[in-house]
Image (cartoon, helix red, strand yellow):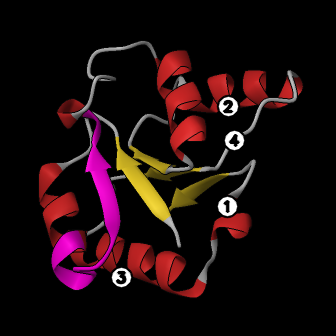
């Protein structure tokens, strides 16, 4: 079963739309956890401990932290970076496709981009 975490800056409208399309999706908002306001490196360690794929818009810093974890041989369940450069409907369709067609091992140690 795939599990997700939406970081504290993830667009709430996208998150709600995703939850509407996939009501059984196991997803937590980081701001509802003890990881709220923690540094990215700690957030990625937590997502690994929780075996949750991270949803984020942060294409600037997250990939570097992922690379650092991978270089250290640390587990990384994956990251999906969602760029908000296209219509929300297209973003939701892409996310639904990625999630619906995938399994956790498809995302492991990867940073994927939508779109």
Give the labeled residue for mark 3.
93
Say what secondary structure mark 1 lies in: helix
Q: Looking at the image, which residue is at 42% across and 56% down?
A: 4
The spot of residue 25 in percent (x, y) is 33, 72
User: What number is the disc on residue 66?
Assistant: 2
Proximity of marks 2 and 4: CB atoms separated by less than 8 Å: yes
Q: Nearer the viewer, mark 2 or mark 4?
A: 4
Give left or right: position of 38 versus 98.
Answer: left
- Span colored in magenta: 19-30
Q: Earlier in the sequence, mark 4 or mark 1?
A: 4
Give the labeled residue for mark 1.
107
Label 3 crowd bin: few (<14), some (14–19), many (20+), radius 10 Å: some
Proximity of marks 2 and 1: CB atoms separated by less than 8 Å: no
Say what secondary structure mark 4 lies in: loop
Q: Earlier in the sequence, mark 2 or mark 4?
A: 2
Q: Earlier in the sequence, mark 3 or mark 1?
A: 3
Label 4 crowd bin: few (<14), some (14–19), many (20+), radius 10 Å: many
Q: Nearer the viewer, mark 2 or mark 3?
A: 2
Label 2 crowd bin: few (<14), some (14–19), many (20+), radius 10 Å: many
Give left or right: position of 32 versus 56.
Answer: left
Q: Earlier in the sequence, mark 2 or mark 3?
A: 2
85 or 37: nearer the eye? 37
Q: Looking at the image, which residue is at 29% across and 36% down?
A: 30
Q: CA distance from mark 2 to mark 1?
A: 12 Å
The spot of residue 41 in percent (x, y) is 56, 18
Give the labeled residue for mark 4.
76
């Amino acid at each position: 079963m795939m599990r997700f975490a939406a970081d504290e800056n993830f667009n709430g409208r996208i998150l709600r739309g995703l939850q509407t399309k996939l009501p059984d999706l196991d997803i937590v908002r980081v701001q509802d956890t003890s990881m709220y306001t923690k540094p990215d490196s700690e957030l990625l360690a937590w997502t690994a401990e929780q075996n949750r794929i991270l949803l984020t818009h942060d294409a600037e810093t997250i990939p570097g932290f992922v690379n650092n974890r991978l270089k250290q041989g640390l587990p990384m369940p994956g990251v999906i970076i969602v760029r908000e450069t296209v219509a929300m409907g297209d973003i939701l369709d892409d996310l639904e496709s990625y999630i619906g067609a995938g399994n956790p091992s498809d995302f492991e140690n990867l940073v994927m981009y939508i779109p």
